[in-house]
Amino acid sequence: MAKVKILDVREMPATEPERVGKMNAAIVYQFDAFRTYYLVLPAEDLTEEKIIEAIRKKEAERAPWMGKELEI
């Protein structure tokens, strides 16, 4: 299991039509100095468990591309 450092959490108005009037949280996180990412989650029910779940989901989506070499 990897360690993740949360660098910043900022609230901002949601831009999705179904969430007008609500707030989102932009979360900037880092695995190491070379791998810094962000994600956006609904702010009204933000918990540590939801952040962990969202980071795991994003990493699972990114994993098939890690180390892949493309010929152009």
Image (cartoon, grey):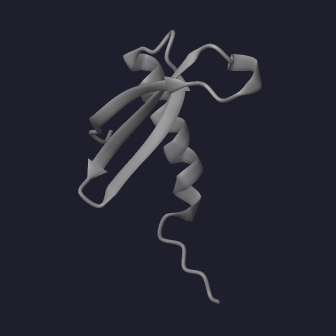
> Can you say whether 70 is above or below 43 in the image?
below
The residue shown at (42%, 14%) is 47
The residue shown at (42%, 18%) is 49
Q: Position of residue 30 (x, y in %)?
A: 31, 46
Question: Depth check: 34 or 18 in front?
Answer: 18
User: As drawn, is 51 to the left or to the right of 58?
Assistant: left
> Can you say whether 27 is above or below 35 in the image?
above
Q: Position of residue 10 (x, y in %)?
A: 38, 28
Q: Position of residue 22 (x, y in %)?
A: 59, 14
The residue shown at (29%, 61%) is 34
> Can you say whether 58 is above or below 48 in the image?
below
User: As drawn, is 22 to the left or to the right of 46?
Assistant: right
> Can you say whether 56 is above or below 23 in the image?
below
**Quarter assignment of residue 48:** top left
User: As drawn, is 47 to the left or to the right of 45?
Assistant: left
Question: Depth check: 56 or 9 in front?
Answer: 9
Q: Position of residue 16 (x, y in %)?
A: 70, 28
